[in-house]
Image (spheres, helix red, strand yellow):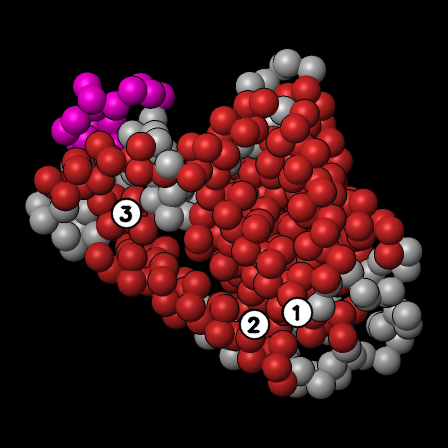
Amino acid sequence: MERGSLESRIVWACVLVLAAFMMLSTAIAQTAAIVMIFALAVDVVRRRGLGGGRSPLMLPLVILLLVRLFAVLASTNVSTSLPALWKEIPFYLVVIAVVRLWDPVREDRLVLFLRVAFGAAAIVAVIGSFRYVLGFDHRASSITSSYYTFGMYLTAVFALALPFGNNRTIFPIRWIWVGGVIVILAGILLSMNRIHWVVAGCLILGVGVWRERGLLAVAVVTGGVLLVLVPSLMDRFDQLLAMRENLSDRDVIWRGAVAMGSDHPFTGWGVRTFHEVFPYMNEIGDKRVGSWHNDLLQLYMESGILAVGAYVWLLTAAVAAGVRTWRRSSGSEVLRTFSLGGVMALLSFAVAGLTGVFISDPVAGVFLRVLLGMVGALSAFDEAPAHEGHVISS
């Protein structure tokens, strides 16, 4: 793989742009993703082949892409599904671009990516929290997307950054990490997304017990202060404890899915056809609902069982590859720890996807693909030592 090529440098620059502007400008973020796809196309033409190295992500990714493409063409309402050809399908190629062209052994670039992603998430969390406190939004959200995408983005970056609390290469001053974690956690709490609370809580408990005991105290104090200062936060917490009585129309959605689930098990009903095919729309309280509120259910109802299998295979392969890198890598500690953070971020997406749809989200979905690509690239180089002159000493 020619990772020193112009295409490789373009992909690296675009990954950095995505890290900085993911939640600040959808236009900039999506433009960066499109440029990555063009860089991949140029590289494929120049080297006369697609390839994907030794990454185990390639086969399930290609299967998922083809199944989703077929679901557009075989849709029960092709005109409704057609926009997926430019709003979703091409962005699967971001994974291939990163796996093929991003250099995981360049520790200096990895350090910069982590710092930019962490700093951008902290800024986004501050903006969203202030918008909520000042009454502009009823739940903390970004200036470009919904509170649900906002919460997912912060949770993923939170997971990515948690293992680096004692890493002086990333955070020379530990209080920078502590402050950023508090700010991002506050943003997650004020988004009022119960599933993101659960995921963040599990991450804090796991990392806290393992290596960051002080993190547990910080999280408890942050949560306690916000519960006292923000009455609606306590109301939302009560809803979390009484989850079965506060399903936000998900019980109706699942009832509809059960009624329709056996009709198109292999092809699905078509991408983006929820409004056209859902039988109980009149029973849903929020008429703005436009998805199946579950990544796996969404893939099944839109694309059939093959899409579900390919997606589960893709996530499983990525998590397994990341764990192998973390356990076996003889390279730098930054690379090794990043593989662990990447696994936790991917698992965060998987768990949160049980109550929301992120695989086709124009913002969170792109971030998920970048993370998949990075972990996939690491899996092909988990035994490679850091290149001389490329490592920033701690």
**Location of residue 198 with respect to 313 vertically, above or below:** above
Residue 150 position, x and y percent, is: 57, 35
**Location of residue 256 with respect to 371 vertically, above or below:** above
What kind of residue is marked 3? Answer: Leu
Q: Is 325 in front, or is 256?
A: 256
Can residue 319 be seen by looking at this rendering? yes
Disc on the earlier residue, 1 or 3: 1
Disc on the earlier residue, 3 or 2: 3
**SS assignment at label 3:** helix
Q: Quadrant of the C terminus?
A: bottom right
**SS assignment at label 1:** helix
Q: Which residue is mark 3?
A: 297
Give residue 210's mark. 1
* Magenta segment: 273-288
Q: Which residue is mark 2?
A: 322
Q: Is 249 in front, or is 78?
A: 249
